[in-house]
Image (tube, grey):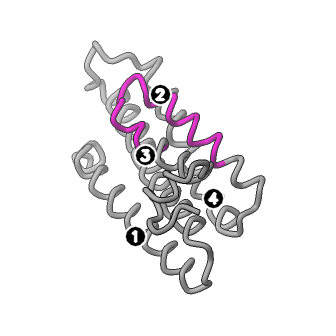
Amino acid sequence: MLQLLLDGELWLLVATAAGVLAAAAVFVAGWRRTLPKRLVIATGLNAFFGLWIGLMGTGHLLAVTTKAILGTLPPTSHLWIAIPFGFAIAVPGWWLVARLEPLMKSEATARRQAVWLNAWLAVVLVVPALPLVILPALNLAMLTYASKSARRTFVGGPAG
């Protein structure tokens, strides 16, 4: 059981599957309510990323603290940065998940919070995992939805 808790690949698989299921649920709910495509896609992306990074951050925190307690954490690991990093990604991830319903209703406060949470996660993830910045960057693009080319790229169809 302890090996499962410490298995990073298992955490990745579970987080990815949960994120895909959450995004699919948002897409189905949004299209049943005939909400605007942009809103459904932005909420679905935030559902996927929020759940995924929330689970990965939680797994990171559990693994680091468990290894520290058992004395199996490599001496080169910097516990003083590993624990805050886990909180810095887990808490905003779960916060994104908690704000999905208001985001789906297109509440301005929820949208602003989602923009700030995704920006925070992008900044936090730049140093240790640059490729992970793609997910919050995509969320920011959908949430701000500024240019006509972005509309064409992310939603499809006419840009006007």
Question: In this orientation, which residue lies closer to the viewer: 125 or 55?
Answer: 125
Residue 145 left/right relative to 138: right
Picture quadrant where residue 35 is located: bottom right
Please tell me how crowded label 2 is: few (under 14), some (14-19), or many (20+) other residues with Cα within 10 Å. some
Nearer the N terminus, badge 4 or badge 2? 2
Q: Earlier in the sequence, mark 3 or mark 2?
A: 2
| Residue at mark 4 to residue at mark 2: CA–CA distance | 22 Å
Q: Nearer the viewer, residue 37 or 156?
A: 156
Kind of residue sitting beneath label 2: Ile
Nearer the observer: mark 1 or 3; the answer is: 3
Indicate the position of residue 107 as horizontal and vertical percent values: 76, 61
Q: Amino acid at mark 3?
A: Leu
Q: Earlier in the sequence, mark 1 or mark 3?
A: 1
Screen quadrant of the C terminus: bottom right
Instruction: Give the residue pinned by disc 2.
Output: 83
Identify the residue position indicated by label 1 in the image.
21
Range covered by the magenta-colored residues:
114-136
In front: 141, or 96?
A: 141
What kind of element bears circle 4? helix
> At label 4, which amino acid type do we have?
Ala
- Mark 1 to mark 2 CA distance (whole Å): 28 Å
Q: Is residue 24 above or below residue 76?
A: below
